[in-house]
């Protein structure tokens, strides 16, 4: 079958334009799994305003969290800046993987403002989802054992759980690395990254 060369050229040009557009979108989005570390916010980078081991849900004490601006003022957790610096220092990208919140009309927006201000993390690197297992990465740093287990099972790679009193009794298996501090989490990330480099050679 012959083809009209003018039409063929137009198709090629369109394909090249589309490929360029796709590359631009991907360039601004999450990087390949081996280069990005997924990090949860509450209980990891951010201090928990209301610890989940308290029976607060639905109580008046939660109302301030629903007010606009609340998430822009949460305290950063001890060691959080050092963790972010350490991960970037070994050439890995950070993608924030945090749950959206239905009860506040501004929570997600406020959280993005906070992440940009505190850690220079841009909107391209923030994913709001309750399905954390659906996002791939080198590892996931979490404070919820359920998310940590489901993620590790999905990707066949260890996740990292920050020990908190609310997850002390939550079940974890060997696919979840438990650590006592964000400093220990940074060490675990380094060792996973080094392991990946070795196995890929
Ligand atoms: Mg959390």
Image: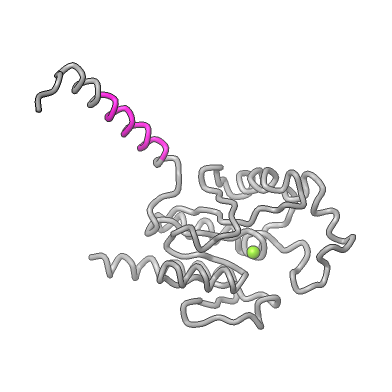
Where the N terminus falls, by quadrant? Answer: top left
Left or right of 73, for residue 35: left
* Residue 145 painted magenta: no
Return the residue found at the far left.
Answer: 1
Task: Tell me the quadrant of ligand 1.
Answer: bottom right
Percent coordinates x, y for residue 180 in the rendering: 60, 76
Q: How many marks?
A: 0
| Boundaries of the magenta span | 13-25
- Determine the residue positioned at 37% across, 59% down: 34
Front in this rendered view, residue 121 or 85: 121
- Determine the residue positioned at 24% across, 20% down: 10
Left or right of 67, for residue 115: left
Percent coordinates x, y for residue 129 in the rendering: 59, 55
Q: Quadrant of residue 123?
A: top right
Where the C terminus falls, by quadrant? Answer: bottom left
* Residue 18 painted magenta: yes
Classify 12 as above or below 71.
Answer: above
Return the residue found at the far front.
Answer: 1
Magenta stretch mostly in which secondary structure?
helix
Front in this rendered view, residue 91 or 37: 37
Classify 107 as above or below 193.
Answer: above
Left or right of 111, for residue 3: left
**Residue 184 visible in rendering:** no
- Determine the residue positioned at 25% across, 24% down: 13
Percent coordinates x, y for residue 32 in the rendering: 38, 53
**Residue 26 visible in rendering:** yes
Return the residue found at the far top.
Answer: 6
């Amino acid at each position: 079958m012959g083809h009209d060369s003018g039409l063929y050229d137009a198709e090629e040009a369109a394909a090249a334009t589309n490929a360029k557009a796709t590359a631009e979108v991907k360039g601004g989005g999450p990087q390949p799994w081996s280069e990005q570390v997924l990090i949860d916010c509450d209980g990891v980078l951010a201090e928990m305003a209301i610890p989940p081991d308290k029976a607060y849900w639905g109580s008046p004490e939660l109302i301030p969290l629903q007010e606009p601006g609340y998430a822009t003022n949460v305290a950063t957790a001890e060691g959080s800046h050092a963790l972010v610096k350490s991960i970037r220092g070994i050439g890995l990208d950070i993608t924030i993987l945090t749950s959206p919140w239905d009860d506040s009309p501004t929570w997600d927006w406020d959280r993005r403002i906070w992440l940009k201000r505190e850690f220079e993390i841009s909107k391209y690197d923030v994913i709001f989802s309750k399905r954390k297992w659906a996002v791939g990465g080198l590892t996931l740093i979490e404070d919820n054992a359920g998310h940590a287990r489901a993620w590790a099972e999905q990707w066949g790679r260890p996740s990292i759980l920050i020990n908190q009193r609310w997850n002390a009794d939550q079940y974890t298996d060997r696919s979840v690395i438990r650590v006592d501090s964000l400093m220990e989490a940074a060490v675990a990330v380094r060792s996973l990254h080094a392991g990946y480099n070795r196995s890929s050679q």
